Image (cartoon, helix red, strand yellow):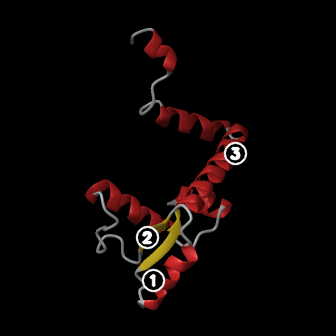
């Protein structure tokens, strides 16, 4: 959530919060739906996505008309992707200036990603 606040939402302000996005991630990861454990994530709203030519404002208006804006929030997938992309760019720029942070990020990344050179050597 810190990364989302510091990079994604700073680069592209959205109507959702970092907690809303974390809850959406939990729902997708654990239930393959947008539903999440609301007892564990108190205050998070369920994210509904507009995509393509759909209007996020129209979707949010429908949410508001049902008096559900405290429970649900509309986000356009293009805006979310743009925020992620801009935030990632800023994050990578900062890593180039902060060598200690860059080393920590690479150390963690090595636990998940394989260098293509190793694959070529059949390791």
| Distance Cα–Cα, label 1 vs label 2 | 9 Å
Dot 1 lies on which element?
Answer: helix
Q: Residues within 10 Å of mark 1 (few under 14, many from 20)?
A: some
Left or right: residue 19 versus residue 52 is left
Q: Residues within 10 Å of mark 2 (few under 14, many from 20)?
A: some
Q: Earlier in the sequence, mark 1 or mark 2?
A: 2
Quadrant location, the C terminus: top left
Q: CA distance from mark 3 to mark 1?
A: 38 Å
Q: Which residue is mark 1?
A: 63
Q: Determine whether the residue tagged by mark 3 lies in a helix, strand or loop.
A: helix
Foreground label between 3 and 1: 1
Q: Nearer the viewer, residue 58 or 31?
A: 58
Q: Is residue 16 visible?
A: yes
Residue at the extreme left of the image, as rendered: 31
Residue 38 falls in image quadrant: bottom left
| Residue matched to label 3 | 94
Q: Residue at x 44, y 8 (%)?
A: 121
Q: Disc number at residue 48? A: 2
Q: Residue at x 49, y 35 (%)?
A: 109
Who comes first in sequence, dot 3 or dot 2?
Answer: 2
CB atoms of marks 1 and 2 within 8 Å: yes
- Along the viewing direction, whichever of 2 and 11 lies nearer the viewer: 11
**Residue 92 appears at what percent x and percent y?**
65, 42
Depth order, front residue of 109/66: 66
Task: Tally the numbered discs.
Answer: 3
The residue lying furthest to the front in this view is 53
Point out the tag, 3 or 1, that comes first from the N-terminus: 1
How packed mark 3 is, by other alpha carbons closer than 10 Å (few <14, some 14-19, many 20 or more), is: few
Tell whether 1 sits left or right of 98.
left
User: Whole-Å distance between the Cαs marked 3 and 2?
Assistant: 32 Å
Cβ–Cβ under 8 Å for marks 3 and 1: no
């Amino acid at each position: 959530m810190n990364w989302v606040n510091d990079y994604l939402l700073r680069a592209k302000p959205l109507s959702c919060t970092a907690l809303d996005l974390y809850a959406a991630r939990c729902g997708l990861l654990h239930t393959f739906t947008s539903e999440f454990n609301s007892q564990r994530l108190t205050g998070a709203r369920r994210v509904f996505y507009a995509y393509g030519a759909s209007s996020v404002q129209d979707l949010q208006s429908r949410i508001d008309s049902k008096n559900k804006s405290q429970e649900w929030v509309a986000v356009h997938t293009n805006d979310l992707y743009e925020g992620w992309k801009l935030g990632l760019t800023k994050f990578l720029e900062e890593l180039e200036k902060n060598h200690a942070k860059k080393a920590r990020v690479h150390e963690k990344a090595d636990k998940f990603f394989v260098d293509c050179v190793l694959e070529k050597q059949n390791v």
